[in-house]
Image (tube, rainbow, N blue to C red):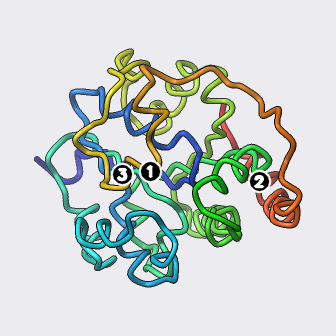
């Protein structure tokens, strides 16, 4: 397949942001191959996160630990007309960003008031480096300064109107929308990373995008400083979001 004819979609998400649901959505397309967080092992190898991320040893054994080699795979893989790479933004670390001009880049964000308590149920006492908000706005500025194509999605908008948001996303990515993207079988997928047992319970029980449900439990007092730190970044991202 001619490399120039391939659409490469790189999702740059924070954790607990329906990124796995989006991966499952794109996996329903017959023209698409999905990749689950290919830079996760690279991130663990080069940070202290390997000391507290569940299943870190298994992740390091299951994936290529060399970030440059992973990026090379992302720009040379040619198995399908559409390639969807689900990534966590903070996994980038100090990698050269120039490969992004070969991608349809999608920043996926979520209100930190809703995301932080969910993440803290798995990772104790998270920091802003664990959840990617500052990296998201830094990436947004990089895209603007280098005239690189990007789209911002807010998880809430996706859940409020999945079809409309996916139509817009496909349009901006230069591919036709497929109705199959709206539902899937409630079970794991073969593309799931080995970390799925720690993080993917909800999506494995779902058959499509869930209904948006605002958080009702009180926000944890010990995480309020982190919330304040993340909120200003989220407000910037929200201004760019589609849908």
Q: Name which residue lies at 38% across and 57% down.
A: 37
- Disc assigned to residue 198: 1
Residue 58 rendering spot, x and y as whole percentages: 29, 67
Q: Disc 3 designates what residue?
A: 85
Residue 126 rendering spot, x and y as whole percentages: 68, 67
Q: Secondary structure at mark 1?
A: helix
Q: Quadrant of the C terminus?
A: top right
Q: Disc 2 designates what residue?
A: 234
Q: Secondary structure at mark 2?
A: helix
Residue 203 rendering spot, x and y as whole percentages: 45, 33
- In the displayed structure, does residue 136 sit left or right of residue 169? right
Q: Along the line of sight, which residue is nearer the eye, 110 or 78? A: 110
> Along the polypeptide, which appears first: circle 3 or circle 1?
3
Mark pair 3, 2: CA separation: 23 Å
- In the displayed structure, does residue 130 sit left or right of residue 29? right
Residue 161, quarter of the rendered image: top right
């Amino acid at each position: 397949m001619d490399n120039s004819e391939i659409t490469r979609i790189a999702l740059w998400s924070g954790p607990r942001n329906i990124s796995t649901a989006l991966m499952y959505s794109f996996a329903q397309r017959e023209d698409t191959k999905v990749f689950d967080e290919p830079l996760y092992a690279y991130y663990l190898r080069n940070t202290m996160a390997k000391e507290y991320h569940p299943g870190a040893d298994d992740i390091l054994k299951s994936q290529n630990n060399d970030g440059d080699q992973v990026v090379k795979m992302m720009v040379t893989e040619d198995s399908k007309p559409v390639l969807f790479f689900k990534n966590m933004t903070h996994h980038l670390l100090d990698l050269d960003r120039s490969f992004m001009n070969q991608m349809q880049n999608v920043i996926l964000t979520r209100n930190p008031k809703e995301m932080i308590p969910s993440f803290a149920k798995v990772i104790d006492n998270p920091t802003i480096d664990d959840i990617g908000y500052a990296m998201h706005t830094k990436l947004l500025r990089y895209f603007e300064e280098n005239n690189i194509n990007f789209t911002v999605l807010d998880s809430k908008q996706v859940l409020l109107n999945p079809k409309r948001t996916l139509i817009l996303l496909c349009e901006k990515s230069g591919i036709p929308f497929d109705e199959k993207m709206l539902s899937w079988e409630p079970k794991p997928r073969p593309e799931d990373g080995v970390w799925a047992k720690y993080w993917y319970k909800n999506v494995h029980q779902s058959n499509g995008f869930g209904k948006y449900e605002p958080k009702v439990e009180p926000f944890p007092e010990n995480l309020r400083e982190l919330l304040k730190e993340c909120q200003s970044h989220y407000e910037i991202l929200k201004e760019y979001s589609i849908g």
